Image: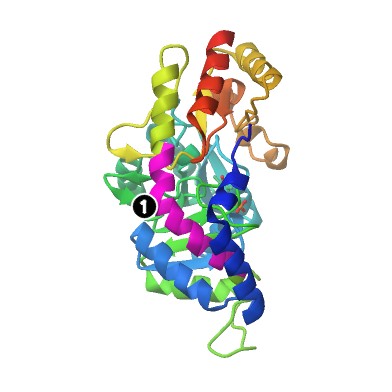
Amino acid sequence: MEFRDLKTQYQRLKPEIDWAFTQVAADAHFIMGKKVAELEEKLANFAGTKYCITCANGTDALQLALMAWEIGPNDAVFVPDFTFFSSAEVVSLQKATPIFVDVEEHSFNLDPEKLEAKIQEVIGEGILTPRVIIAVDLFGRPADFDRIRPIAERYGIKILEDAAQGFGGSLHGKRACSFGDISTTSFFPAKPLGCYGDGGAVFTDDIEMAELIKSYRSHGKGKEKYDNVRIGLNSRLDTIQAAILLIKLEAFEKYELEAVERISKQYTNALRDVVKVPQIPEKYASSWAQYTIVLANRAQRDGLQAHLKEFGIPSMIYYPIPMHRQKAFEEIPNCEKDYLVTNSLCDTVLALPFHPYMEMEDIQWVVDHVKSYL
Ligand SMILES: *Cc1c(COP(=O)(O)O)cnc(C)c1O
């Protein structure tokens, strides 16, 4: 059994994808070809934003946003303690300081009350300037933007939505990648919409930011070629990735999103009486980047993982280490008591095999073995 079955997806789309490969090779316009502009327009339409700027990966997408806002030394950027490393790494890369904030157990996402407390703490200390909240749509469920947006406005802070896992999700029918002042996603193969290598995108309604980010992704280019007006990155999306994403976006909209919704319900109905299952309130839709259950304690989690492995069922721990305990951030002072929820989640979460091509028998096989262990 595959944890995320990309081979079946390829078999389903093979004729179109093979044709795309040959077409791009024959065209020989490998970087920023026509397909890239076509994809950017489709992605902006899908997310409901005015502009989409593709780039080399989801980490660069986050960094490009921080560059456009000129985030740097003495700036504080608030990041969930429970997330993938990139969400905080880019802050330190810009020489700003990531301030870690605990998450809510039921959503796995930023806790708005603790966020506001951290903002006040930073203001009280008077050393760093609060500039940005990086709100991550963890495992596919959008962050609580109903409560985060008013906080951002109260303190005059920007929201950067890290929708690397959220692409395809929604809140009040509004799609992920549209909640930030700038939002980003990743097309890493295992993400909800993945390409055949690395890829990413930035979304915004702000034309000034869109123009700046276009410049930063291509060596800080000015109006003419070889006219460089700022220090930037080399972070473009390959034409071949755009061609593949155009095909996969169609499948994503047509049936993959529906399939993951159906499969998540099958898991939830079968497991909700034996274990803590993901909670997606009515107003949200998840893109189901992961289907994550929460066990009673670490021994039970590790025991279940070993038990599943015996029956050929792969599972993953996203994430085993809280951000504030990562060695790379050891110089940032913090208090363990501020991160009780994240500390506990890192010991108790387990992501089950999950993808749009999962068959009923596979779901049942996983469910049976989770149940037999518990
Ligand atoms: C995957 C991921 C990223 C980084 O994306 P890459 O394309 O791998 O650079 C950033 N944030 C989160 C939450 C992610 O899951």
In magenta stretch: residue 247: yes
Q: x, y (%) of residue 128?
A: 53, 50
Q: x, y (%) of residue 164?
A: 52, 49
> What stretch of residues is rendered in magenta?
240-260
Colouring mode (rainbow / by chain / secondary structure / one colour): rainbow
The foreground one among 372 and 274 is: 372
Pointer 1 residue:
179
Q: Quadrant of the C terminus?
A: top right
Classify residue 263 by image quadrant.
top left
Residue 341 can be seen, yes or no: no
Q: Residue furthest front?
A: 15
The foreground one among 10 and 207 is: 10
Q: x, y (%) of residue 119?
A: 44, 42
Predominant secondary structure in magenta? helix
What residue is rendered at 49% in x and 38% in y? 139
Element class at badge 1? loop
What residue is rendered at 58% in x and 13% in y? 297
Q: x, y (%) of residue 293?
A: 51, 23
Residue 353 can be seen, yes or no: yes
Q: Is residue 132 placed above or below 85 in the rendered structure?
A: below
What residue is rendered at 55% in x and 34% in y? 82
Residue type, label 1? Phe
Q: Residue furthest bottom?
A: 224
Would you say 269 lies left or right of 335 here?
A: left
Classify residue 264 by image quadrant.
top left
